[in-house]
Amino acid sequence: MSDAAVGWKKCSGCKEAISYSSVYYVCNVSTCNRKRTALQFCSVSCWEVHLPVARHREAWAEERRAPTQQEAARMEATEAKPGGVKEKSAERKPRRIMPPSPPSPARAGGGSRLPADGPKEVLIVASRLKEYVKAVSGYNTSDGVLGPLSEIVRIEVAKAIEKARAEGRKTVLDRDVSS
């Protein structure tokens, strides 16, 4: 049986066919609506199934109407034409994954560092650090501690950035930070 006889598209939740001209639901979050992702759901309960995985801060289901069989065929024909959507997307530059950079002589001593022109302000919240030291030991904390601790944080963050870059990601995750 052909896809046209079954329905317009499949539900991203239950994998049942969404009929032509029927109501379906999409997530309001843009990452769920991109052409590459294109999540569509036959019911609100199927939409709710993707929420624990997607972990949206705030989301709701938007009601849409599936195209008729003729409209769907016309859209597919437009995309298949030279100069249509598929051709344009093929012309885009591929996503670049940066290879890990070789260690420089400055990094050979252990810690990687941000470029010299990187921001050098204090990265530690002084009040929180002072509260912590007081609670743990009863000691006071000098403001002079903030600079060296910020430098340690910069070094650890640079290491985490290198790990993320080596794995081809542009997001530093908790697993990139050494413990």
Image (cartoon, rainbow, N blue to C red):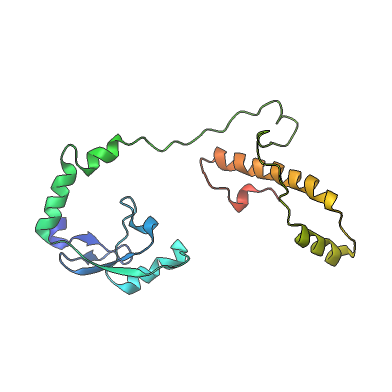
- Residue in view at x 77 percent, y 57 percent: 126
Number of marks in the rendered image: 0
Q: In this view, does 152 lie above or below 132?
A: above
x, y percent for residue 38 = 31, 56
- Residue in view at x 56 percent, y 33 percent: 100
Asked where in the image residue 105 lies, by quadrant, the reply is: top right
In the image, taking residue 101 as reference, residue 3 lies left or right, namely left
Asked where in the image residue 139 lies, by quadrant, the reply is: bottom right
- Residue in view at x 79 percent, y 50 percent: 146
Farthest-out residue, left: 70
x, y percent for residue 132 = 80, 63
Q: In this view, does 101 lie above or below 60?
A: above
The quadrant of the image that shows the N terminus is: bottom left
Farthest-out residue, bottom: 45
**Front residue (pair 69, 30):** 30
- Residue in view at x 52 percent, y 44 percent: 170
Residue 1 seen in the figure: no
In the image, taking residue 124 as reference, residue 63 lies left or right, namely left
Asked where in the image residue 6 lies, by quadrant, the reply is: bottom left
x, y percent for residue 25 = 29, 67
**Front residue (pair 50, 96):** 96
**Front residue (pair 89, 54):** 89
Farthest-out residue, top: 105
**Front residue (pair 116, 99):** 116
Residue 140 seen in the figure: yes
x, y percent for residue 101 = 58, 30
